[in-house]
Image (spheres, rainbow, N blue to C red):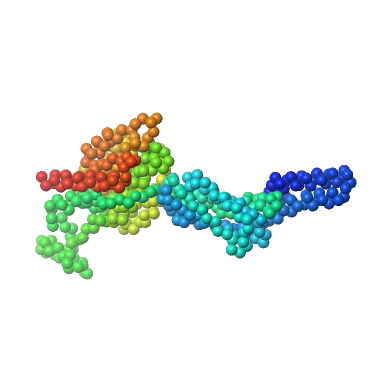
């Protein structure tokens, strides 16, 4: 009874108090007619409150988000279907869905009449501006009676998950010889002038195509040998993402960390569409996404991992081994001292393909913070033979990627020239 009476509105409580006061006056004045009126006035809010409490158990709601995965700055539509499953229909519903601040304001709907069999459909849109796993809900309804004497709040639907993935930018081209895997650059191996001697052969097996017979090796070994075709486009590429708090500046969607995450996502999807086996790791070597071995992982695996990624409080880059495992490496690095980068550079040989996008985080930071100098890190990487492109917030990601591809081509040319001397 106490829980039921808690649903009385201010109007209902005033009417109940007036009825009780009239009952007291009728006893004092010995007015039976006034007592009958007071009894009706007291019974009305109590009856309405009871019926409203019964009616609230007969509601069911379903929420559907389309699409369930949306990029930062995109748009998703939320559809809510509400129907009545009880025998008593509420006189009015105030429906409010819980929406985080990052997705916009909380939508509110007033339903004057709820059809018994078909129910009603409610729709609203969200415009996410921050990356992350966002929770929509719970969906709550405030049920009121036609007289406005009682109301009850009920949770109709639990939370639903909306994955806000980083913004992906279309890129063009790949670094020269990229994707050939570990060791020397593919462009060097293909153009170093070593010719047929570099062919990989194996003994002939029943069913092998005779067009793949390597006659020079067959004559040398006096055994039929066939050429093993290499597939450079199936090579591996590791993308390293520096997500340390100390390495980035700015806040919200315009922070340098969000730029780095968006760029890493764009590179992963771009290279994967070009047939590369992709690994995504952090500055400590922790693997976020690993290729299944056949290059069949879905792009959403990368996007979901980056959507849930939170910055780390680690101060320095701490790689205890080669984070790429011998594969070619593309690193997206924030502010870093030469000493910190030394932990990464010492695990990578000059013969390996090493590319880096170095963020000039001083362009993202506010005036109160000490400026971050990237020139020392830039000089260290270039002296170690890395191809480096410097990123600023005003430069398009496609231009940064094109610059990185050119540094890869220049590096290949210099290595080929050195091999020929």
Between 366 and 163, the residue placed more toward the observer is 366
For the point 29% across and 35% down, which residue is it?
374
Is 230 situated left or right of 104 in this image? left
Res 287 seen here = no
For the point 87% across and 45% down, which residue is it?
27
Between 200 and 359, the residue placed more toward the observer is 359
Query: Which picture quadrant has residue 286?
Result: top left
Res 407 seen here = yes
For the point 84% across and 49% down, which residue is it?
34
Between 127 and 134, the residue placed more toward the observer is 127
For the point 41% across and 43% down, which residue is it?
253
Is 348 situated left or right of 51 in this image? left
Q: Position of residue 88 (x, y in %)?
A: 67, 59
Q: Position of residue 328 (x, y in %)?
A: 26, 48
Q: Position of residue 162 (x, y in %)?
A: 47, 51
Q: How many marks?
A: 0
Q: Position of residue 283 (x, y in %)?
A: 34, 42
**Residue at the outermost bottom position:** 207
**Residue at the outermost right position:** 30
Is 416 situated left or right of 395 in this image? left
Between 243 and 70, the residue placed more toward the observer is 70
Q: Quadrant of the C terminus?
A: top left
Q: In this rendering, is residue 116 above or below 147?
A: below
């Amino acid at each position: 009874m106490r829980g039921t009476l808690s649903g009385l509105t201010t109007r209902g409580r005033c009417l109940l108090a007036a009825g009780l006061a009239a009952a007291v006056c009728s006893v004092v004045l010995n007015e039976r007619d006034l007592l009958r009126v007071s009894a009706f006035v007291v019974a009305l809010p109590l009856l309405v409150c009871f019926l409203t409490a019964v009616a609230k158990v007969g509601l069911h709601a379903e929420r559907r988000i389309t699409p369930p995965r949306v990029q930062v700055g995109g748009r998703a539509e939320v559809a809510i279907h509400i129907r009545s499953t009880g025998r008593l229909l509420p006189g009015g519903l105030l429906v409010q869905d819980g929406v985080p601040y990052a997705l916009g304001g909380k939508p509110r709907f007033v339903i004057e009449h709820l059809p018994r069999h078909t129910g009603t459909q409610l729709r609203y849109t969200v415009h996410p501006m921050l990356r992350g796993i966002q929770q929509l809900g719970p969906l709550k309804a405030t049920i009121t009676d036609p007289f406005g004497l009682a109301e009850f709040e009920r949770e109709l639907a639990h939370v639903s998950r909306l994955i806000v993935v980083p913004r992906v930018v279309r890129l063009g081209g790949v670094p020269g010889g990229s994707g050939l895997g570990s060791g020397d650059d593919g462009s060097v191996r293909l153009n170093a002038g070593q010719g047929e001697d570099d062919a990989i052969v194996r003994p002939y097996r029943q069913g092998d195509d005779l067009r793949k017979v390597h006659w020079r090796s067959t004559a040398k070994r006096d055994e039929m040998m066939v050429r093993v075709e290499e597939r450079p486009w199936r090579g591996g590429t590791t993308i390293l993402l520096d997500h340390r708090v100390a390495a980035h500046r700015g806040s919200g969607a315009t922070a340098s960390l969000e730029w780095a995450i968006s760029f890493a996502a764009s590179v992963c999807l771009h290279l994967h569409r070009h047939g590369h086996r992709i690994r995504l790791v952090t500055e400590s070597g922790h693997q976020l996404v690993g290729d299944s071995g056949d290059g069949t992982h879905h792009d959403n695996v990368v996007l979901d991992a980056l959507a849930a990624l939170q910055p780390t409080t680690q101060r320095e880059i701490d790689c205890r081994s080669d984070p790429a495992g011998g594969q070619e490496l593309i690193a997206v690095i924030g502010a870093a001292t030469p000493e910190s980068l030394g932990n990464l550079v010492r695990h990578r040989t000059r013969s390996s393909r090493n590319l880096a996008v170095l963020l000039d985080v001083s362009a993202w930071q506010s005036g109160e913070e000490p400026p971050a100098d990237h020139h020392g890190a830039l000089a260290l990487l270039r002296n170690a033979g890395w191809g480096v492109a410097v990123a600023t917030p005003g430069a398009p990601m496609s231009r940064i990627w094109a610059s990185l591809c050119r540094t890869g081509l220049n590096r290949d040319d210099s290595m080929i020239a050195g091999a020929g001397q």
